[in-house]
């Protein structure tokens, strides 16, 4: 862990080691309540994230506390629903052909965002149609928690609010769906970009199985945040109530044996799409390599 500490200003830990990330995330004193009165820099980072990842007074599932009963029930229901689709999507159905064609090298590089958003949107609404406007809204939404300058600009101009309003209206105000088409879609796009690179290598194209290709293409979110609800000690590091933990799962997931961090698999904060996304990537690779 790397600590950033200045009394009364900042109290945070950056965590990039896979084992330490798992230890922090599984510690019952660390949560996503984000309600501690803490120092200015911590408050700024948390406030920016919650402002972007909430709508009409409700937080996105990815920033909801672990003891949220309603949130847990909805996430489990979504997990079951997505898992029912795994066997079919793994076979490379026709709906994946536009992405498979893109992986083969056809189509503009920027077109993959719309195509990925369309696939994810249809998981929640049969009438969902991705548009250039919905993709621009997704770009606005994902940038807000990452860049202070872009957050301020999009917030002051109302661009962030309009982006969330558009995306929520397209999926009947389902915040799990908004997270999928506005935030998680960017991880999927980066996975597909990696797959396109693999496909362009004739040796890899001929040797990788669909399952191995999907595994090697997975891209995790850059980072997630947690906050201590009580003081304590973890792996020799003392922390206070309100200490902020920034879990760099993007870096950690690339290390040997840490692939489960992509979806925080097996933890209280696991992603409902932990089985569906790899299966979908398998389907895209199978389709791309079996057709010309």
Image: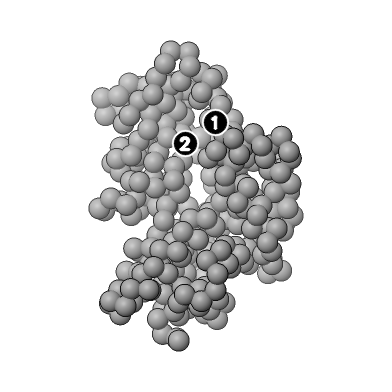
Residues at marks 1 and 2, CA–CA distance in whole angstroms? 8 Å
Secondary element type, mark 1? helix
Secondary element type, mark 2? strand
Give 217 or 211, whichever is nearer the viewer: 217
Within the image, what quadrant is residue 18 found in?
top left
Q: In the figure, 53 relative to 235: above or below? A: below
Q: Quadrant of the C terminus?
A: bottom left
Mark 1 burial class by Cα count in 10 Å: few <14, some 14-19, many 20+:
many
Colour scheme: one colour
Q: Which residue: 59% across, 30% down?
A: 47
Give 206 or 70, whichever is nearer the viewer: 206
Q: Quadrant of the N terminus?
A: top left
Q: Which residue: 33% across, 46% down?
A: 252
Q: Position of residue 28 (x, y in %)?
A: 41, 32
Q: In the figure, 70 relative to 240: above or below? A: below
Q: Do the residues labelled 1 and 2 touch (CB within 8 Å)?
A: yes
Report the residue marked by disc 1: 46
Q: Is residue 138 visible?
A: yes
Within the image, what quadrant is residue 236 found in?
top left
Q: Position of residue 228 (x, y in %)?
A: 44, 27
Q: Which residue: 46% across, 40% down?
A: 224
Mark sitting on residue 225: 2
């Amino acid at each position: 862990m790397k600590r950033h500490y200045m009394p009364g200003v900042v109290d945070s830990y950056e965590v990039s080691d896979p084992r330490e990330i798992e230890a922090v995330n599984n510690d019952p004193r660390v949560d996503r309540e984000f309600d501690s009165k803490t120092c200015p820099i911590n408050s700024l980072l948390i406030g920016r994230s919650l402002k972007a990842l909430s709508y009409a007074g409700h937080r996105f599932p990815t920033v909801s506390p672990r003891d949220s009963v309603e949130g847990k029930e909805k996430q489990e229901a979504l997990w079951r629903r997505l898992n029912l689709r795994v066997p079919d999507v793994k076979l490379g159905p026709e709906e994946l052909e536009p992405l498979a064609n893109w992986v083969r090298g056809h189509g503009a590089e920027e077109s993959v965002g719309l195509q990925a958003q369309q696939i994810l949107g249809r998981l929640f609404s049969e009438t969902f149609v991705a548009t250039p406007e919905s993709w621009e809204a997704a770009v606005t939404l994902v940038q807000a928690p990452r860049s202070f300058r872009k957050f301020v600009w999009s917030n002051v101009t109302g661009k962030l609010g309009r982006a969330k309003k558009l995306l929520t209206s397209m999926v009947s105000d389902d915040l799990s769906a908004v997270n999928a088409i506005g935030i998680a879609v960017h991880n999927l796009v980066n996975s597909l970009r990696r797959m396109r690179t693999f496909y362009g290598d004739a040796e890899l194209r001929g040797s990788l199985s669909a399952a191995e290709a999907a595994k090697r293409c997975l891209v995790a979110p850059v980072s997630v945040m947690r906050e201590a609800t009580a003081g304590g000690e973890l792996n020799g590091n003392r922390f206070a109530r309100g200490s902020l933990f920034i879990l760099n799962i993007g870096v950690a997931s690339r290390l040997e044996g840490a692939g489960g961090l992509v979806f925080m698999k097996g933890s209280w904060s696991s992603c409902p799409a932990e089985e569906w996304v790899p299966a979908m990537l398998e389907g895209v690779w199978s389709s791309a390599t079996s057709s010309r």
